[in-house]
Structures are given as C-alpha cells and as structure tokens.
C-alpha cells in the first residue's frame, strides 16, 4: 500500500445510495444466511457465495454496510457502530418476517467481527457463524511497515487527511480476477466512485483503520461470551492478515463447537479467489451438520502447523 495525503475542504454532498445489497429467496422453511462484506468493500465480493448457498435452498441477504457507496469523504467519518447497525437491522427485519427458521451469519474481514458481535448479542437466534479471513490486526505479508504509525495518529487530527491506496495483489491470488481489479485501481482517483460499487474503494481512509481498532477492543471483551458454533476459514498465505487472527478468535471464544479450515491457494478475499467454491462447500457442510443436529464434535479441528 502507498500512502496519500489529501486536504479536502469542500462540503461533500451525499448521494443517498439506495440499499442495493443482495437478497435471494430460498426454499420456504429453510434457514437464512446473512452475509457481511468487508470494510470499504461491496456486496459483490459475496456474490459467488450467496448464489452457491441459494442453490442449496438457503435464503441469503447481504446488506450494504452504512455509507458504503457514498463519497469517501462521507465514508471516512462512519463509526463501526453504524456498520454494525446495518447488520443488526438486517437481522431484526429478517427475524420479524420469519422467526421460525434458523439464521446463520458469515462475514469477510471486518465483516467477520460484526458476525461475531451479532452472535454474542443474539445467542439464542443465531445458529452458527462463519468467519472468513477475520481481521483483528493487519499483519499479513503485504502490509507495509507504515501500519505501525497508526498508533501515533489515532488521536491526531491529521488522521483525517491520510489514505492508504490499495496495491497488488489486492487480496486476490487469481491472476485473471486480480488484473480486472488492477485495471480499475491503478488509475482510480481519491474521490472517484466509478467502479467502486463493483470493486470497492481504491483508497482506505486511515480514520477507518483507527476505528477498526475500536471495534477490535470492543469485540475482545465479548469473545468469551460467544457459545454459538463458529467456523473460521482463512488462507494460510493471507496477504492482509496472518493466521494469528484465526488463532486469536479460536482460543478466546467459548464455543464447544469451533473449527478452523485453512486454504492453500488463496489470499485475503477468499470469497472471490481460487478456492471460493471450497469456501462455499465448507460453509454449506458446516451449516448442514448444525441443521441435522449431527455430532459436531467430530468436525472440530485445530490450526495446522
């Protein structure tokens, strides 16, 4: 990632982006899966997974997180509580519509943290959680040393003027997909939104990284209260977050049923990379065992060396 400094004094008008997340109706009486995209991402990164699960009979909803799709000058002021509010509302609206079926929740990157928060708040309503590339701290092999400067600017007003620009491999090992992302990102300007709905933002406001740290501190206090079955799927060569993130969650949650599944041919965005079908199949298998009240203890695994 490269660092960009930008001062923007003009008032940025809201676009009032309409809710255009994914909503796929499944077979009547079957469970619903809430999918949560990543920070500065888009529901599009969950599209393959959503359609896979829908073909299995699940209803699938993937809300667009608060202010995603708005100009970056608006997004950067958004707090994690607002992102969680988007997920919480999707769940409550769903629960009012159909409170007889089971609900599963899965999130990518920061979305995985929001999924865990939902399970902690509604322990009797969430049947299972899948954490995809959970991001508690950025410590992957492609994260620059400048990440350590976040501690110095977290309480400094200058944080509002700094941005990280995404650079290869963009969390994608698949060369064909990565090239498509690169064609957009390499020429994208800071305040440009063309293509953001499909590929996400090309720039990452430092303010959001600082607020992510607030979310992590909040979640750390909640992890031991989580008893819901939890599945964690991460790439062993994740370029953004090391498998220490999965270890951290696995070791601290109180779930009797907890599983870690490591991928060997993907980077961070595992829902769109080489092994996206494997990710989908493992999630479907995990949810299926819970639905059938199978002896889930047999699915418990620990991290590979």
Image (cartoon, rainbow, N blue to C red):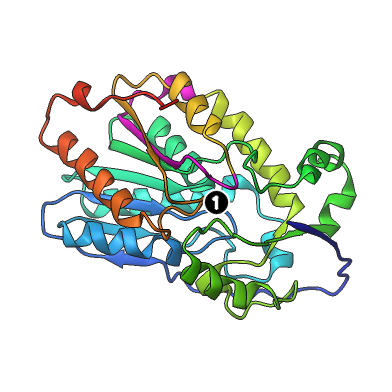
Q: Report x, y in % for residue 104.
A: 29, 43
Q: Is residue 296 left or right of residue 178?
A: left
The residue segment tinted magenta is 223-240
Q: Is residue 51 above or below residue 83?
A: below
Query: As rendered, which of 200 and 211 lies closer to the eye?
Result: 200
Q: Is residue 53 above or below residue 231?
A: below
Identify the residue shown where x is 36% and y is 66%: 22
Query: As rendered, which of 279 and 42 lies closer to the eye?
Result: 279
Q: Quadrant of residue 200?
A: bottom right
Circle 1 residue: 83
Q: In this rendering, does residue 210 appear at all?
A: yes
Q: Is residue 99 left or right of residue 22?
A: left
Q: Report x, y in % for residue 69.
A: 58, 70
Q: Badge 1: few (under 14), some or many (20 or more) residues near its Cα, within 10 Å?
A: many
Identify the residue shown where x is 44% and y is 41%: 234
Task: Give the quadrant of the C terminus.
Answer: top left
Q: Report x, y in % for residue 205.
A: 73, 57
Task: Give the quadrant of the N terminus.
Answer: bottom right
Q: Report x, y in % for residue 292.
A: 10, 35
Query: As rendered, which of 5 and 115 lies closer to the eye?
Result: 5
């Amino acid at each position: 990632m490269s660092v960009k400094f930008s001062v923007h004094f003009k008032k940025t008008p809201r676009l009032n982006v309409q809710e255009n997340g994914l909503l796929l109706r499944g077979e009547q009486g079957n469970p619903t899966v809430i999918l949560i995209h990543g920070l500065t991402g888009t529901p599009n990164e969950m599209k393959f997974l959503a359609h896979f699960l829908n073909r299995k009979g699940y209803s699938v909803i993937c809300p667009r997180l608060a202010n995603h799709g708005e100009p970056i000058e608006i997004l950067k002021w958004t707090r994690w509580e607002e992102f969680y509010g988007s997920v919480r509302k999707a769940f409550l609206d769903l629960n009012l519509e159909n409170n007889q079926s089971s609900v599963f929740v899965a999130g990518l990157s920061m979305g995985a943290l929001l999924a865990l928060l939902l399970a902690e708040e509604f322990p009797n309503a969430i049947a299972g959680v899948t954490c995809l590339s959970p991001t508690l701290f950025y410590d992957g092999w492609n994260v620059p040393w400048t990440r350590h400067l976040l501690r110095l600017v977290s309480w400094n007003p200058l944080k509002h003027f700094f941005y990280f620009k995404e650079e290869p491999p963009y969390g994608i090992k698949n060369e064909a997909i990565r090239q498509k992302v690169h064609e957009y990102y390499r020429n994208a300007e800071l305040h440009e939104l063309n293509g953001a709905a499909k590929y996400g933002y090309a720039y990452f406001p430092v303010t959001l990284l600082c607020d992510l740290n607030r979310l992590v501190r909040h979640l750390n206090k909640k992890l031991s209260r989580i008893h819901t079955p939890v599945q964690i799927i991460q790439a062993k060569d994740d370029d953004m977050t090391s498998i220490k993130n999965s270890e951290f969650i696995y070791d601290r949650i109180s779930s009797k049923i907890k599983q870690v599944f490591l991928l060997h041919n993907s980077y961070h965005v595992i829902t769109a990379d080489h092994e996206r079908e494997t990710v989908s199949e493992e999630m479907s298998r995990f949810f299926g065992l819970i639905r059938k009240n199978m002896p889930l203890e047999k699915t418990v695994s620990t991290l590979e060396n």
